[in-house]
Amino acid sequence: MSVTDQFDHPAWITAGATAVSYVVVLGVVFVLLFVVPFLLSS
């Protein structure tokens, strides 16, 4: 049993997709709340 077989379960794919989605949403919120107002005010 290799290391990659250990993480071949669909739950790991779901957990990874959830983490990636969370980071993407945080990035969008950061841009909308901090970067856009900074660019508009400068």
Image: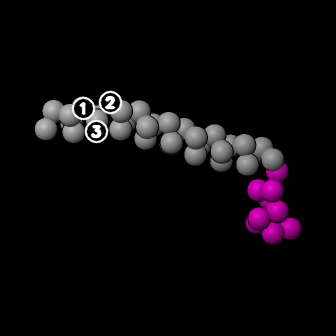
- 8 vs 19: above or below: below
Most extreme residue toward the bottom is 2
**Residue 17's disc number:** none
Residue type at mark 1: give it: Pro
Pointer 1 residue: 37
Q: Quadrant where the C terminus lies? A: top left
**Residue 33's disc number:** 2
- 3 vs 9: above or below: below
> Answer yes or no: do the residues labelled 3 and 2 have beta carbons within 8 Å?
no
**What colour scheme governs how the chains and residues are painted in the rendered image of this protein?**
one colour
- 15 vs 37: above or below: below
Instruction: Give the CA separation, mark 3 to mark 2.
Output: 6 Å
> Answer yes or no: do the residues labelled 1 and 2 have beta carbons within 8 Å?
yes
Pointer 3 residue: 35
Q: Residue 22: x percent and y percent?
A: 54, 38
Instruction: Give the CA separation, mark 3 to mark 1.
Output: 6 Å
- Is residue 8 shown left or right of residue 24? right
Q: Residue 16: x percent and y percent?
A: 65, 47
Residue type at mark 2: give it: Leu
Q: Residue 21: x percent and y percent?
A: 58, 40
- Is residue 31 shown left or right of residue 3? left
Few, some or many C-alpha atoms within 10 Å of disc 3 (few <14, some 14-19, many ≥20)?
few
Few, some or many C-alpha atoms within 10 Å of disc 1 (few <14, some 14-19, many ≥20)?
few
Residue 5 located within the stretch drawn in magenta: yes
Q: Report the magenta residues as a range.
A: 1-9
Residue 7 located within the stretch drawn in magenta: yes
Kindly state the secondary structure of the residue where label 1 is placed: helix
Few, some or many C-alpha atoms within 10 Å of disc 2 (few <14, some 14-19, many ≥20)?
few
